[in-house]
Amino acid sequence: MTENVWGYRATVGHLSGADLTGYKVEAKDGSIGKVDKHSDEVGSSYIVVDTGPWIFGKEALLPAGTIERIDAQEEKIYAGRTKAEIKAAPEFDKDIHLGNQAYHRQVGGYYDGPHRV
């Protein structure tokens, strides 16, 4: 089921082509940062969250399937994971991420496994 984690669910409220850059991102237990970049690519949709000082300025990759809701008016994205789950995810590395299917399987497996919504 790992492929499903890379697509937005119909109930999320995402409009294809919408620019999510700068939206605030909320985990189940509080704010985790802002969207630095995102992709609507079919089968590989995601957001990259700039976590700021929360996890020492690192970025976190969240597959679209981890998103519970997008509020365009408030410019907020609600992720269906806790801060600890996001922090424990495989580390995001933009050089590895681009076009690397093994990395996508690793991240997808993490979020589609025991941390599943």
Image (spheres, helix red, strand yellow):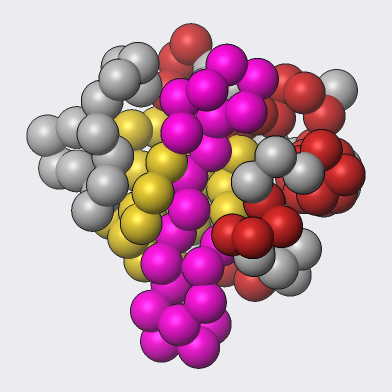
Residue 26: percent from left, percent from top:
39, 56
Residue 9, compared with residue 58, is above or below; it is above
Examine the rendering and report whether any part of residue 85 can be seen: no
The magenta region covers: 39-60
Q: Image point 35% across, 21% down: which residue?
A: 14
Q: Is residue 66 left or right of residue 77?
A: right
Count of marks, rendered view: 0
The stretch drawn in magenta includes residue 11: no
> What residue sits 71% from the left and 57% below the top?
96
Above or below 40: residue 68: below
* Residue 46 in the figure: left or right of residue 89: left
Q: Nearer the viewer, residue 61 or 83?
A: 61
Image position, residue 12 (x, y; %): 43, 23
Front residue (pair 27, 41): 41
Viewer-closest of 1 and 98:
98
Which residue is located at x 40 percent, y 32 percent? 69
